[in-house]
């Protein structure tokens, strides 16, 4: 267990990170992510209000669907990355734990007072067996498309369920009243296909899937375009430029940023951790690693980082400064492991 943002979080369970990682890739893993912030906006003007904080397409988000979105600042940086779900009568928002207070301050600055759900927990069931497990416990949830949401009962408890996750696998995120979280977790773990999994496996899974971790790969100094997240900005918002940081982000969209997020494949066995500097083959500075780990699926080290735009083509050779020595590496496409979200 470790402390994080005022919470005590599981890093790994007795079976270990490697087994937990493979459980998510081959069967199902259950993550307790109750540290994530949960909010709701109510009323007919909720979508328009939230649209003032993000370049995402929130207005017109159909009921029963969820969207990945970025909260941006006036300089075009990313305050947080969030999930926004449209349930009947509410927009339900999941925030990063360490950014909850910053997000709430941004809401307040724009005159928005969300309802906080500090009385709810959040569980994530991830892996190829997740759908069959949910088909037995909550059939309406098992019928959801990718990024679909529904309210359904699991073991007699009404849950807010989305078909989404942070592993690259098919899966479900389940918001549940906190008093029922432990019993619900026990019901899910009673299935022999489900293993408990901690934050260490969550990190290796999301890195293999090429997904950003706030504070590492994105932050208030990183624009959505640099991060490879321009796809979150629909054409209408690009034309209107009516969101925080629109001038800076619009310039990146039109002319390209000077640096971009890429995958990195170190040539040896050494892992390139966050903060590792990179050099081009001519010796000039290339960029910096923001996330790095050993990939259990590939059996090799992988990393993500930001490089000069002229070095971003997959196959470009780089050097990683690891323990005082330059180690060879190449730029790689993302994700490292193909996504298996339900179609």
Image (cartoon, rainbow, N blue to C red):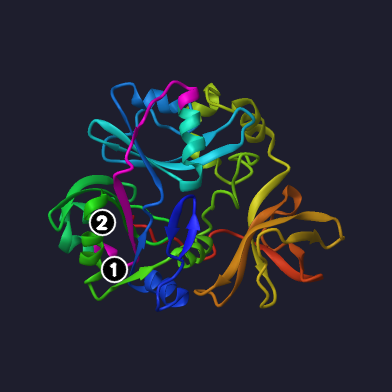
Separation of marks 1 and 2 at Cα, in angstroms: 21 Å
Residue 164: where, in percent of width, then height? Answer: 36, 52
Percent across and percent down for residue 228 are 58, 46
Quarter-wise, where is residue 185 in the image? bottom left
Q: In this view, does 25 lie above or below 314?
A: below
**Residue occupying image coordinates x 51% and y 55%:** 211
Residue pictured at 46% horizontal, 50% vertical? 6
Q: In which quarter of the image is residue 220?
A: top right
Image quadrant where one finds the C terminus = bottom left
Please tell me whether mark 2 sits on a helix, a strand or a loop: helix
Q: In this view, does 327 lie to the left or right of 342?
A: right
Residue lying at 38% horizontally and 26% vertically, measured from the top left: 113
- Residue 91, position in %: x, y? 32, 34
Q: From the viewer's perspective, tell me whether residue 307 is left or right of residue 295.
A: right
Q: Is residue 198 left or right of residue 61?
A: right
Q: Which residue is drawn at 39% across and 62% down?
A: 169
Q: Give the range drawn in magenta.
A: 108-132
Residue that badge 2 annotates = 181
Q: Mark 1 points at which residue?
A: 129
Q: What element carries label 1?
A: loop
105 left or right of 94 in image: right
**Percent position of residue 74, x then y:** 61, 27
Nearer to us in this view, 144 or 278: 278
């Amino acid at each position: 267990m470790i402390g994080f943002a005022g919470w005590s979080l599981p890093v790994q369970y007795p079976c270990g990170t490697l087994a937990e990682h493979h459980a998510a890739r081959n069967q199902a893993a259950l993550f307790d992510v109750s540290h994530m912030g949960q909010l709701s906006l109510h009323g007919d003007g909720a979508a328009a209000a939230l649209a003032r904080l993000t370049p995402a397409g929130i207005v017109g988000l159909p009921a029963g669907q969820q969207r990945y979105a970025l909260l941006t600042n006036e300089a075009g940086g990313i305050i947080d990355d969030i999930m926004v779900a449209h349930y009947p009568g509410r927009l339900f928002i999941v925030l990063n734990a360490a950014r909850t207070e910053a997000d709430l301050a941004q809401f307040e600055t724009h005159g928005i007072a969300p309802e906080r759900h500090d009385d709810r927990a959040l569980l994530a069931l991830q892996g190829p067996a997740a759908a069959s497990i949910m088909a037995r416990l909550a059939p309406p949830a098992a019928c959801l498309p990718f990024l679909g949401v529904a309210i359904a009962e699991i073991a007699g408890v009404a849950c807010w369920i989305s078909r989404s996750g942070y592993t690259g696998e098919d899966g479900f995120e389940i918001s549940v009243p906190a008093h029922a979280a432990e019993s619900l977790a026990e019901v899910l773990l009673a299935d022999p296909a489900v293993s408990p999994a901690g934050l260490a496996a969550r990190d290796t899974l999301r890195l293999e899937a090429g997904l950003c971790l706030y504070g590492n790969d994105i932050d208030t100094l990183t624009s959505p375009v640099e991060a490879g997240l321009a796809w979150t900005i629909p054409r209408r918002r690009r034309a209107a430029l009516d969101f925080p940081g629109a001038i800076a982000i619009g310039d990146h969209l039109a002319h390209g940023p000077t640096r971009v997020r890429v995958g990195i494949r170190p040539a040896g066995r050494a892992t390139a951790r966050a903060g590792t500097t990179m050099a081009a083959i001519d010796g000039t500075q290339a960029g910096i690693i923001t996330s790095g780990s050993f990939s259990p699926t590939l059996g090799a080290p992988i990393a993500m980082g930001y490089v000069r735009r002229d070095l971003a083509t997959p196959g470009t050779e780089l050097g990683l400064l690891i323990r005082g020595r330059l180690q060879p590496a190449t730029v790689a496409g993302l994700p490292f492991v193909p996504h298996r979200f339900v179609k």
